[in-house]
Image (cartoon, rainbow, N blue to C red):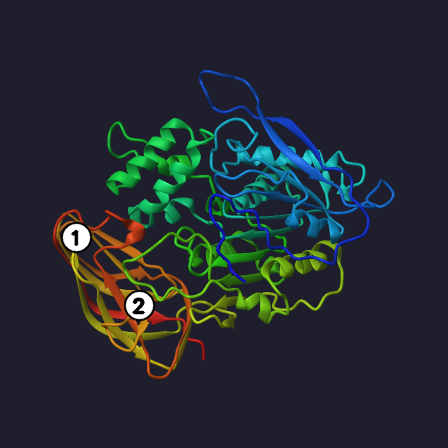
Amino acid sequence: MARILPLLTLALATLVGTPASAATPPAPVNGCVRSVQDPSPTTTAPVDICYTLFRPAGASPVSKVPVIMHSHGWGGSRITTIDGTVQRWLDAGYGVLSFDQRGFGESGGHAYVENPAYEGIDVQKMIGVLAAQDWVQMDGPGDPRLGAIGGSYGGGYQFVGAFTNLMTKGKPIFDVLAPEITWFDLTESLSPQGVSRTEWASALSAASLQSDALPPNVYKALLEAAATGNWPDGSTPGTENLNAFFEKNGPKWHVSQGRQLNIPVLFGQGATDTLFPLEQGFQNWAKAITKSARARSIFIAYNGGHILPSVFPQSSAPANADPCSVKLNNSSFGDLTVKFFNQRLRGMTTDLTGYGKYHLATAGGTCTTVSSIAPNQAFSVGTVTTTAAAGAPTAVEIASGPIRVAGSPNITADVTTIGVDNRAFYGLAIGTSPQDAKLVQNNVLPVRQLGVTTVKGRTIDLPAVAVDVPAGQKLFLYASPVSDMFAGMASRTPGTVTLTNAAVHLPVVN
């Protein structure tokens, strides 16, 4: 199944449930509730957060049902009619509430990008709407039996909602989550090593224009990041501080405050995602939920996610597919989601397995299941020199196939730079020779080092991947002075970035 989930219109339209019921559900109900005002010096008006509520046929005060919360991706809006997504959940016996997040659709205010003080309160208001319905199954006062779905920004609301409830009420209220292609650390996603993902900074800014979603200073700062390649961190007088704006906007901040969610989560992450890469999902799995929760959770990586056109460095461009949901006896991630919720939210017996493990789509379209993603073998690659600012990429052989790699690789090396603000981009590649080697699953990560200097024993993260290298092909370390995803973000002056005593550490599947 194709797993391209566009950032601007994400709606999870492929969820599969049980066969359609002959009964006709009631007409959906639209409404808005007042939530906390924007932090504006010019107005004290509360912000309306608008929703559509869908009630399944047969749900009543004597036949109560659990509910699913849904919201959209960045630049999108809620579901207002019974489409395929809603129908399948209604047929499975769930109510559905879809809502417009702050700054989008019919909701007011500006988007503060899943800040607990704003969007966190908005989610609590939506829970209040559900708790007021006499046909919704309740676990206690103000506590409906509740799951959540959505991807990208629609995954972000799930985390901010659950963590805000945990912070303010002592429990997440949500009983099950299913976030797709979302983030752990928003700053790291948008600007790893302080090097802006310029294509995505531009896309996010453009997507906010129609509804004037972003606060003006944040919109200006994202444009600055896209134009200059320097992440605005407030260090330059007169510039914005995006680090401060995004500080609390994701699971990383809550984890830093000692909070973890002890509820089951079905993670869906794009192995070829260039905005919220696979490693962001790994971080959520390892840190955002407890060890106990991981034993009741499942991690699925598919080839898909946020994907923009990319020509350089050249990628193997794997087909968008979800072999791991199929491996777990489901036709799609949507089918898996319904089954996961049936088991974890309703206590139903299903054939679902694979709990507590990573199920990772490979670049070749197969599925590899592992219990650990940590590197377990080191391969010496000697010296790797990359020109800075411009030039051809370098591919250095790591190992010959057959070899299977699945997880989070890295490099250790002494890093010597010649220039002012030195940058290079690294990833893993596969091919028969350096000349035909192509990036695995479309991703690189930057290294940034200031000045003419040598840093001994530096650890450099490589993009998380899953790949089978067959006999006759080789795995390469790919080093490039430029990258489409970081357009204009090469070194500020010509020079070189040289790795010496370099070793690539790989999570090899035995």
Q: Is residue 314 above or below residue 125?
A: below
List the residue tagged with mark 1. Answer: 389
Is residue 147 in view from this perspective?
A: no
Foreground mark, 1 or 2, reads: 2
For the image shown, how many numbered marks are present on the structure? 2
From the top left corner, tell me how far across and down residue 264 is, in percent: 63, 56
Q: Earlier in the sequence, mark 1 or mark 2?
A: 1
Q: Quadrant of residue 476?
A: bottom left
| Amino acid bearing label 1 | Ala
From the top left corner, tell me how far across and down residue 288 is, in percent: 52, 52
Q: Mark 1: which secondary structure? A: loop
- Quadrant showing the C terminus: bottom left
At a point 57% along the width and 29% down the height, the residue shown is 106
From the top left corner, tell me how far across and down residue 278 is, in percent: 44, 58
Q: Is residue 119 above or below residue 486?
A: above
Q: Is residue 466 left or right of residue 452?
A: right
Around disc 1, counting alpha carbons within 10 Å, would you say few (fewer than 14), some (14 to 19), or many (20 or more)?
many
Q: Which mark is residue 266?
A: none
Q: Is residue 266 above or below residue 113?
A: below
- Quadrant showing the N terminus: bottom right
Q: Quadrant of residue 326?
A: bottom right
Q: Is residue 443 left or right of residue 146?
A: left
* Residue occupying the far right of the picture: 62
Around disc 2, counting alpha carbons within 10 Å, would you say few (fewer than 14), some (14 to 19), or many (20 or more)?
many
| Amino acid bearing label 2 | Lys
Q: Is residue 352 left or right of residue 260?
A: right
Q: Which mark is residue 438?
A: 2
At a point 28% along the width and 60% down the height, the residue shown is 313
How far apart marks 1 and 2 lie (CA) works out to 21 Å
